[in-house]
Amino acid sequence: MKKLAILAMAAAMLMSFVSCGGKKQSKDASSVKVAMVTDSGDITDQSFNQTTYQACKAFCEKNNLTFNYYKPAGDSTADRVASINAAIQDDYNVVVLPGYLFADAIAQLADANSDVTFIGLDVSEFDIMSAASAIGKVDWKIPSNIFCAVYAEEIPGFMAGYAAVKEGYTHLGFLGGMAVPAVIRYGFGYVQGIDTAAKEMGISNKVTVEYVYGGQFYGDQQIKAYMDGWYKNRGVEVVFACGGAIWTSAADAAKDVENGKVIGVDVDQSSKINEYRDGMCVTSAMKGLGATVDAVLQSILDGNWATYSGKISSLGLVSGTDMSVNFVQLPTETWSMKNFSVDDYKALTAKIFKGDVKVSNAIDAAPAVSVKLNMYPNIK
């Protein structure tokens, strides 16, 4: 009788496994509650907060998930921690956090809230491990309830530089915020894209790139004056402004010359840049925050959280044909380019995805290029 009971139990377990298709069962939508916390700003900032909010809201509405967002009372780790705790107390069990400023909060809260899933966007291993070390968590292992995404910035940087030269620009600039790895990858990718397009067009000897870091992540009069020198005196046509709000100095200078242009970064910045002058924004080198939100939240619903659990992943291209799912992109609907077409962009993406066009992510030295590259000391 005991043997028969064991066989019956085994058969029941097998039938249960087969009925699930041999896969983990999907989560009931009613058990998943998603909260998004802003870094300190509004969900209308036309940047990380707004893009993440819109992606979370759209996904949750589509999948009938409960969703809410929280805005910290101020711009400090303590304020961000308080907002995350408020979401947890309100029974939200998936918390989406856009930006590296959340590293400290994640390191503080993840261990004590093992039943809450933390999704950090653009939070690097250096960010989170430094934050953990600062609060005494030496040799800390990232727990299973955390996933952080960083991005292959060199790819959208390459795309933006390539597109700008194909559009017809031959004197280009790069204004970085500070020389941190993400900004360097953007800049060196941009230079590689410029060089590749110039070689294809046979105009390498006619293309010049000016390259500098501001030394800070915000614009001011000194950096604006430096950009004035590029646009007014050197004849720079377009500047890729990369690093927080430092883009404001490039846009302030670009509006003072006829047809001065700016390339945005991280998200589609066309609406903000074009406030300075219609059509000023050529394009933006974007991180696919929306694609990240969709992919990670879908994995939670599908019962496949293990794909992301306890990981910090560098996200780039995942398709050579479907631009919408890629984690690095150019915004085709809002760019002001006329000569570089959407079909050209799709062809370039396919080549990079297949490896026919190589983009290096090395940041130890500037890429060797055939165009003229002028690199300057930090402005500050």
Image (cartoon, rainbow, N blue to C red):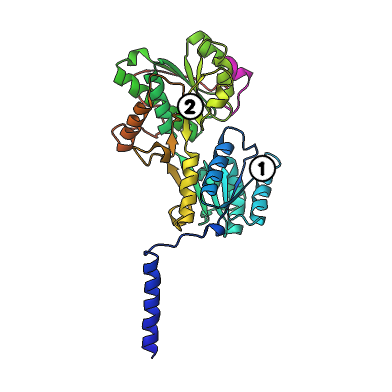
> Residue 342 lies in what quarter of the image?
top left
Q: Residue at x 67, y 56 (%)?
A: 89
Q: Amino acid at mark 1?
A: Lys
From mark 2 to mark 1, how far is it between C-alphas?
A: 28 Å
Looking at the image, residue 282 sits to the left or right of residue 30; the answer is left
Which residue sits at x=57%, y=25%?
272
Q: Amino acid at mark 2?
A: Thr
Placement of 45 over or under 35, stated as above or below: above
Q: Residue at x 38, y 39 (%)?
A: 317
Q: Nearer the viewer, residue 171 or 16?
A: 16
SS assignment at label 1: loop
- Quarter holding the N terminus is bottom left
Q: Position of residue 211 (x, y in %)?
A: 47, 21
Crowdedness near tag 2: few (<14), some (14–19) or many (≥20) residues, C-alpha within 10 Å: some
Return the residue nearer the eye: 371 or 132: 371
**Which residue is labeled 2 in the image?**
334
The numbered dot on residue 71 is: 1
Q: Is residue 275 magenta?
A: no
Q: Position of residue 206 (x, y in %)?
A: 36, 12
Q: Is residue 222 magenta?
A: yes
Q: Which residues are magenta?
A: 215-225
